[in-house]
Image: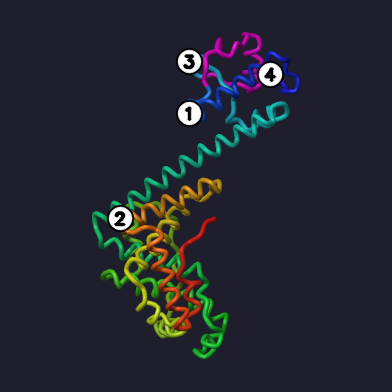
Amino acid sequence: MRSENFDPSTIKIIETMFEVLFNDLSNRISEEETGWRALDQFGIMQTVQSGLLSSEIIERNSKGEVRLNFKNYRTCQELKRTFALQIDQLEYFLNVKTDEVTVNKAQETLNKIVESVHRSPSSWRYIVALGWWKMLESSGMPALIDDILNEGFSPEDWAIKAASSSTELALSVSQKLGEINEFNDAINFLRQIKIPIDDITLPSPVDQDDVQRVKKILKWIDIEEELTEPIIKTLGFLWFSFSVLNSTNSFSLSNESIIKLYKVIWDAVEKILGKSKSELLNELESVMDKFDLNQIIWASDIIRVPEVI
């Protein structure tokens, strides 16, 4: 049964079914429960019902109720010939529904992280180690080419050695919050609190002499001296949270929902640190200004808030 061959009464029935779907989805009814109604509520004749069922335009549940078979891709493509506007509206509603579920799951994950920190403040050192490592790794570790060459690195060597040193630099920052001897301690922490995250592939071990040269080029000791505890924790928590949520595809969302998710993450930061987002960003900006004054101009490309939109 092709949709362009529907008679006017069948078209009216399908339009009513769409309206029921939209109403249920607007009322936050789950996809499993949405759209189901008794035959008489749609005014479907037995002969019409048989044709719609056999062509899989509608489906029937164990209660004898029917609804549009909107989860069937082929059915939606067929209906789009006659009901293009309604199909577009349905796709919008379903995307919103998916986004809501994803944001709610993200909230649950963040709550688990916050609870872990409240329960055991020592968790901060692991969160910071992982979060700062992600921040450093993703930055590409920019530095002045003259400084790189003066320390005996070629640009190609620097890209490899600096990236490989990122775990050591992150570990150095996290040690300002407590004892942590190995980066694997942070990975074990993830397993203990059962945070879902992709398998972490650490860079190859790097010679400690290379690490010290990387720190010298970046003026890492000078950078660490200016880092306040709120900045260390804010950036660590943000990058850690973004990594965790990214591993569960929580950012495969509409721009509107990404904004909501971004707010959820910042709300968690404010709650756990007892400072507002504006206060924390102002503190970070103040430190960045100091780096600029001290000619550490590459710091702002390394030490930064993650962006997703």
* Viewer-nearest residue: 76 or 74: 76
Q: Nearer the viewer, mark 4 or mark 2?
A: 4
Identify the residue position indicated by label 4 in the image.
Answer: 11
Image coords of residue 141 (percent x, y)? 50, 75
Looking at the image, is mark 4 or mark 3 earlier in the sequence? 4
Q: Callout 4: helix, strand or loop?
A: helix
Neighbourhood count class around disc 1 (C-alpha, 10 Å): few under 14, some 14–19, many 20 upward: few
Q: On the rendered structure, is 105 left or right of 1?
A: left
First-in-chain label (2 vs 3): 3
Q: Are marks 1 and 3 in contact (CB under 8 Å)?
A: no
Quadrant for residue 10, please give it.
Answer: top right
- The residue carrying mark 3 is 63
Q: Position of residue 236 (x, y in %)?
A: 38, 64
Question: Mark 2: which amino acid?
Answer: Gln
Give the quadrant of residue 86. top right
Q: CA distance from mark 1 to mark 2?
A: 38 Å
Magenta region: which residues? 36-60
| Residue 119, position as x, y percentages in the image | 24, 54
Q: Inspect the magenta stretch and tell me whether residue 155 lies in it.
A: no
